Image (tube, rainbow, N blue to C red):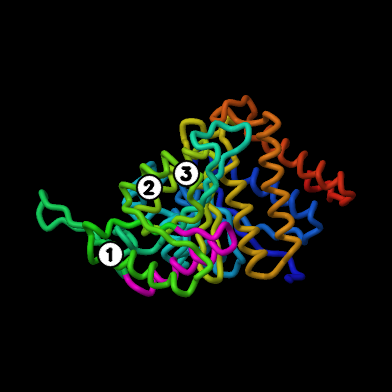
Amino acid sequence: MSNTPYRLGVLLGDGIGPEIVPASVHVVDAALAAAGAAPVEWQELPLGAAAIETHGSAIPGLTLEALAGLDGWLLGPHDSVAYPEPFRSQLNPSGTLRKHFDLYANVRPARAFEGGRAIAPDADLVVVRENTEGFYADRNTHAGTGEYMPTPDVAIAMGVFTRPRIERIARAAFELARRRRGKLTVVHKANVLQLSSGLFRRVCLELAAEYPDVAVDDFHIDAMTVHLLRRAADFDVVVAENMFGDILSDMTGELAGSLGIAPSLNASDDRAMAQAAHGSAPDIAGRGLANPIAMMLSSAMLLDWLATRHGDPRVTDATERLQSGIRAAVRDGVSTRDLGGTASTAQFTDAVVARIAAEASAVGVPVDPRAS
């Protein structure tokens, strides 16, 4: 178990990022205090539109250097389409971080909230998305991108699938399934993309022999969308290549209630980045209307990743307290307007902190007043 504070980065990002990221820092501090864990040492670093103005880059070199020395970080959403050129045409900040640190696993849970607006109220599943190759051209070449135009009327994009990277994402998915309900679904399009998507399916099914305790099935991507609409509650862990995983996880987020509650974690073997699945929502930025749940739950995923990696039961406890506090607030009728409520970002954050503190007080755990 770690006896020293974890050092985590804070990247506010654009749009609603400067609202939802500090809210997440606040509830993480409250949960750690309630669990009696060491407080996090936070380091705020420049990124996004503000960094372009102050450092001439959306993701300055000093940010990358600092992140390399941290245990993980919170990444707020970015609005790269609004950046001035040449920054708009460059790889966006999240893509840069995923590629630079080889954050190969994008883990996106979808679980409905009691008191929320779920289309599939019984949904409780996780999409595990391969994050470094597949059909996303910006991650498929050492230099430049895997997208090009030999003539003005012809556009070509490469999809790359390699056994080592399929194996590592499949293992991550199998290990997660073992910790959950023991079910794994492989999503592919091997009937048409027989070589590329076929390799993805084949490697995943080959690894199943090493996990006899996990039940495995597989579906074509088009059929999977229908199955999720009809019976989302039947699925546990879903593993897919980059593009399919991206699309499915947005869909499952909506099935669970809203992209505003859809968290994600981007992880390698030695570092992780908490990042909400939604965008920067510039239309509501600065108005106190943003739903911070996705960023808060992403931060809880980062805590859980740290706890698992370091064998830290107090941080595991903090993770559970944080998740419980968020769900208790929604269950009690406190939510932002996208979930049908009237709470502001700050009011919802205060409600979560209050419920974390109340639970701790109920069992006689002293809570650091600085966390509330």
**Which circle's residue, 3 or 1, is located before the other in the chain?**
1
Q: CA distance from mark 2 to mark 3?
A: 15 Å
Q: Quadrant of residue 67?
A: bottom right
Label pair 2/3, CB-CB below 8 angstroms: no
Q: Nearer the viewer, residue 337 or 46?
A: 337
User: Does residue 333 appear in this view?
Assistant: yes
Could you tell me which secondary element the residue under label 2 belongs to?
A: helix
Could you tell me which secondary element the residue under label 3 belongs to?
A: helix
Give above or below for 289 relative to 74: above
Q: Nearer the viewer, mark 2 or mark 3?
A: 3
Is residue 322 a member of the stretch shown in magenta? no
Q: CA distance from mark 2 to mark 1?
A: 19 Å
Q: Nearer the viewer, residue 65 or 213?
A: 213
Q: Nearer the viewer, residue 190 or 32?
A: 190
Secondary structure mainly formed by the magenta segment: helix
Q: Label 3: which residue?
A: 232
Q: Label 1: which residue?
A: 198
Q: Label 2: which residue?
A: 247
